[in-house]
Image (cartoon, grey):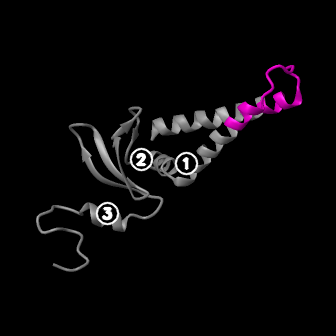
Amino acid sequence: MKADSYEDDDSQGPTVSYLRRMARPGDVTIIDIDDSRRLATILVHGKERNVAVRSLCCLSVTSYVRRGILVFIESKYSDWFILGCIGVNSILLALEKHRAPATDPTNVAVEIISNVLSAIFLAECVLKVCG
């Protein structure tokens, strides 16, 4: 057997360790599909995840859209971005003046930024459900 072979002596295809080594950053590698449970084991950013074969009954694990969503939501940068948004939202809750009128400039700014953050959190939720 050659040293660069991806197969074990008793296997029928690539091993998980080979797939881990050969996976490109920012790509989704399908390791296994279990049709009886309708689950797929995938490799994203070096992490194994079990996901449904079809998300929302329309997005297959092999579709480019779903693969892009999985790469995005499993990225450490998106995690850090959402964590930063949570931190900003917490600070805004502390800055809000409850006894001041609604036309107070601080409360108006807090309201606008809170609405933007709510839209970001909604988009994250939708992407995680689709992924």
Secondary structure under tag 1 reads: helix
- Give, as a single range, the part of the protein colored magenta: 90-110
Q: CA distance from mark 2 to mark 3?
A: 19 Å
Which numbered disc, 2 or 1, marks the residue closer to the eye?
Answer: 1
Judged from this view, the residue extending furthest toward the left is: 10
The numbered disc on residue 63 is: 2
The numbered disc on residue 25 is: none
State which quadrant residue 98 falls in: top right
Which numbered disc, 1 or 3, marks the residue closer to the eye?
Answer: 1
Residue behind mark 3: 19
Q: Position of 33 compared to 72: left or right?
A: left
Question: Does residue 83 lie above or below 15 as drawn?
Answer: above
Judged from this view, the residue extending furthest toward the bottom is: 2
The amino acid type, in three-letter code, at marker 1 is Asp
The amino acid type, in three-letter code, at marker 2 is Ser
Which numbered disc, 2 or 3, marks the residue closer to the eye?
Answer: 3
The numbered disc on residue 79 is: 1
Mark 3 crowdedness (10 Å alpha carbons): few <14, some 14-19, many ≥20: some
Quadrant of image for the C terminus: top left
- Residue at image position (48%, 50%) is 74
Mark 1 crowdedness (10 Å alpha carbons): few <14, some 14-19, many ≥20: few
Quadrant of image for the N terminus: bottom left
Q: CA distance from mark 2 to mark 1?
A: 23 Å
* Residue 70, x across and y down, in percent: 46, 48
- Residue at image position (30%, 45%) is 40
State which quadrant residue 57 falls in: top left
The numbered mark, 2 or 1, whose residue comes first in the sequence reads 2
The numbered mark, 1 or 3, whose residue comes first in the sequence reads 3
* Residue 29, x across and y down, in percent: 36, 56
* Residue 56, x across and y down, in percent: 41, 32
The numbered mark, 2 or 3, whose residue comes first in the sequence reads 3
**Magenta-drawn stretch contains 79:** no
